[in-house]
Amino acid sequence: MEETTVRAVIFDMDGVLLNTEPISKQAFEQAFKSVKKILDEQTYQEILGRSLNDISYFLSDKFADIKIGEQIIQERDRFFLNYYQENHVEVLPGVCSFLEYLTKRKYKLAVATSASKETAEFLLKKANIFHYFDAFSFGSEVVNAKPNPEIFLNAAEKLEIEPAAAYIVEDAVSGIVGAISGGFIPVYIPEKEVDEEFTSEFKCQAFRDMESFHLHVIESNFQQALERVSMKIMDN
């Protein structure tokens, strides 16, 4: 895909824009304790990136209890929102400067998050980055959770942009798989070290942090500008 076609960037929220995942994990651990269950790492990885409704169904099925999923989600939300009512929402390093850069260069920007509309708007506004975005796609708006691309396609439709003209910035494998299946340009910024086997298999660009991706976009735009100048000189 030629990068000259890129006109939009669609970001996941938790773990990409905001450093909320540690508190989210604590909230789930607290919620599991409230129903006398233990959150092991395998289960936590299985629920990452899913909408809260999807997590509720998954946990009810896992524990063979139709009510337990909803109970866990309610307790998780209570702990999570209470924490951020009283504490600062941390924006991850490099995010604000990159959003400024993209805004000045007229990129269309969106957030695609499995969080509910109320939770996502609360966090983004408290972090003072809500105003950068032109559109939002929330987990409560779609039927299918990642790795289904529905949440990204919903964002692209709101931006009035074709998938091939948009980066999807994700920290989760399920999000990258969804981006690829939806025809977007995937950008992988994992919480831990880059899995070279995964990036090779799915042919996606991977960066250690947002600052590295920002630098890549600057370099790409500079190279494209040079190519346009060269073409004009040749035409003359």
Image: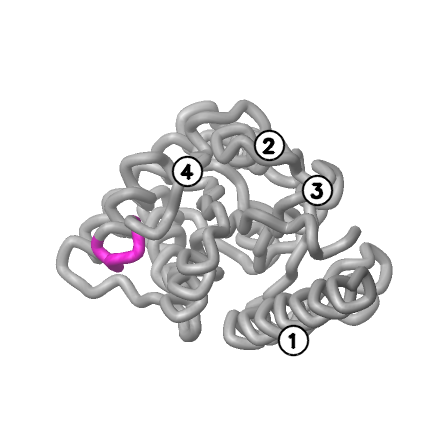
Residue type marked 2: Leu
Residue type marked 1: Glu
Q: Secondary structure at mark 1?
A: loop
| Location of residue 71 (image quadrant) | top left
Residue type marked 4: Phe
Q: Residues at badges 4 and 2 in contact (C-beta under 8 Å)? A: no
Between the residue at mark 4 and the residue at mark 1, the CA separation in whole angstroms equals 28 Å
Is residue 127 within the magenta segment?
A: yes
In the rendering, which numbered label is found on residue 113? none
Q: Secondary structure at mark 4?
A: strand
Q: Which residue is mark 1?
A: 193
Q: Which residue is mark 2?
A: 153
Is residue 123 within the magenta segment?
A: no
How far across and how far down the image is residue 111, in percent?
A: 45, 45
Between the residue at mark 1 and the residue at mark 3, the CA separation in whole angstroms equals 27 Å
Which stretch is magenta?
A: 126-130
Closer to the eye: label 4 or 1? 4
Most common secondary structure along the magenta stretch: loop
Residue type marked 3: Ala
> In this view of the protein, which residue sits in the foreground, 55 or 13?
13
Q: Secondary structure at mark 2?
A: helix
As drawn, the residue found furthest toward the left would be 86
The mark nearer the N terminus, 1 or 3, is 3
